[in-house]
Every structure is written in structure tokens, then in C-alpha cells.
Image (cartoon, helix red, strand yellow):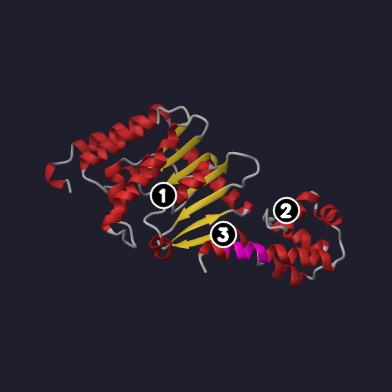
Amino acid sequence: MPDEEKLLANRWRLARELRRLREQADLSGRRLAERVGISQSKVSRIESCATIPTHAEVAAWAAATGLSATAAEKLGTLVDPAYTEIHPWSSALPERVHLQHDIQEIENATGVKLVYEPSIVPGLLQIAEYARRVFAQFEPAYPALDVPAAVAGRLDRQVALFDPSRRFEFVVTEAALRFRITPVDVMLAQLDRIDSLSTLENVSIGLIPQSAPALTHVPHGFVIFEPADEEGGTLVMVETVHANLTVADPGEVALYKRQWSRLKESATFGGSANALLRDIAAELKALPPESVP
């Protein structure tokens, strides 16, 4: 079963179980809503799988319908699979040339995008040759004929940066800017691109200097997608070595937001960030020719 179908099946399983419990307890939607502390319309949306309840709401639902502690705990285990999508690269990539359009669909519904990257330049800031090298080094490997399409898809997503109605915030470590994924001339062009994009009013680029005191430790990058309208839910996307994870559970999303705040507090912005870019560029230019890959 494809990952999307598994997620939908998990959500419907939770929705049907919650409705069964309400009906078994002989409670109307209005009465249950009063006991759980939510609106009657939300009860309806939950039971029709239009809204996914939080862990706290499911626990309150269990208490309102008289479930035992053991049964309530079992009910709680249905929540996480309804919130988290796991897309292994080994199964996701063979189904399509690349995933850039999938990400773009999420971005199109996003009002604010928060990006943390500790190891490489974020995709929306990459120049073409840098992106090509990233895709060429990916595992499982992209077929050589598919790499140009993946690069073009990534560059096409960058058009959104110039839409003033949307906001993009990036926090990138100094180590990511120094990671030598390309020859020096390409790295210099990449640093210049970051400097240029930082002048956009709707784009914020913060850099965490290696000398900055650490306020937290996050070993992997992540992206927070905040919806453009109140009806949507905030999502977090995490790329791991083996899979892409999409997290929607409010409690877990809140954890990533707290980490984002700490990382942002460690970052430098504006003139200080531009000075750091210039320092890195100067060090690259000073490298002896024989050390350039």
C-alpha cells in the first residue's frame, strides 16, 4: 500500500473508532463536545476524518466515553500513525523523476516557511550547479538523466521567494556554508547568491557562526510549513538518510518550533551575517589552486 494510502487508512481507523465509542456511550455530538471541551462542529469533523484530534483530545474523548485506563492507552496508540508520514527514499523516488513538485504543492499552501539546515545550503537558496552536485551525490542515486529535471524543479520552486505575500526564514550553520560540495568558484557564486537573496524584504537569512554559544543541539535539518489560512495545519518535514518524515501532531510541531526559536537566537543576521559570508569567501579565494577539487 502506498504511504499516502496508509496514512489515510490510519486516520480513518482513528475517526471510526472515536465515533464508535461516542455511539456506544450513547452520547450526542453536542454532549460529547461539552465533555471534551471542543465545539460540536469539531466533533463532526473528527468523526468524518476532516480533522485529526490531538493526543489530549483523544484522552479526553476516552474519559468522556468511560473507557478504562488500559483501553484509553490502546486508543492513544492510534493517534501517532494518523499524524506522521514516513516516505522511504527507496520507494518514493522510483515512482517519479523527482519530488520537487510534491514539495512545491505544500509550499503553495504555506504562508510562512521556516528552514533549519546544519549541513548544506537549503534547497531554496541553491544555485543550479550546487543543486546538481547535491542531487548527484544523493543515495539512492538519481538516474543521470533525471538529475537535470530535479535541478530544474528545485529552481522553479525558488520563484516563490519573490512573492511578497509569503515569508521565508532560514537559519543555516557556518559549517553548512563551508561544506565543500562544489569547486571553489561555484562555492563563491553560491555565497554571493545567499547574500543577494538576503536583501528581499520577505526573506530572512540567519547564520550560526561556529564561535556562537550553542543553545540547543539539533543533528538534522527540518522545515516548518505554517499554513496561509487558518483552516490548514502546521507541518514539519524532516529529511533523514533513509526517508522523508512529515509530522503534523501539534505537540511534536510545538517541539520543533521551540527548537527553531533557540536556533534562531544563536544566529546572526543582517550586516553581521553578510560579513561572515565575506569572510568565508575570502578564505576560499585564498586556498592554493592544488587544493581545489
Q: Which residue is mark 3?
A: 84
Q: Is residue 196 above or below residue 172?
A: above
Q: Which residue is mark 2?
A: 45
- x%, y% of residue 2? 51, 65
What label does residue 218 carry, if any? none
Q: Residue at x 37, y 39 (%)?
A: 125
Q: Are marks 2 and 3 in contact (CB under 8 Å)?
A: no
Q: Earlier in the sequence, mark 2 or mark 3?
A: 2
Viewer-side residue, 276 vs 233: 233
Viewer-side residue, 240 vs 133: 133
Q: Which residue is mark 1?
A: 100
Q: Residues within 10 Å of mark 2 (few under 14, many from 20)?
A: some
Real-space Cα distance between discs 2 and 3?
19 Å
Q: Residue at x 80, y 51 (%)?
A: 40
The amino acid pointed to by label 3 is Thr
Q: How many marks?
A: 3
Residue 242 in view, yes or no: yes
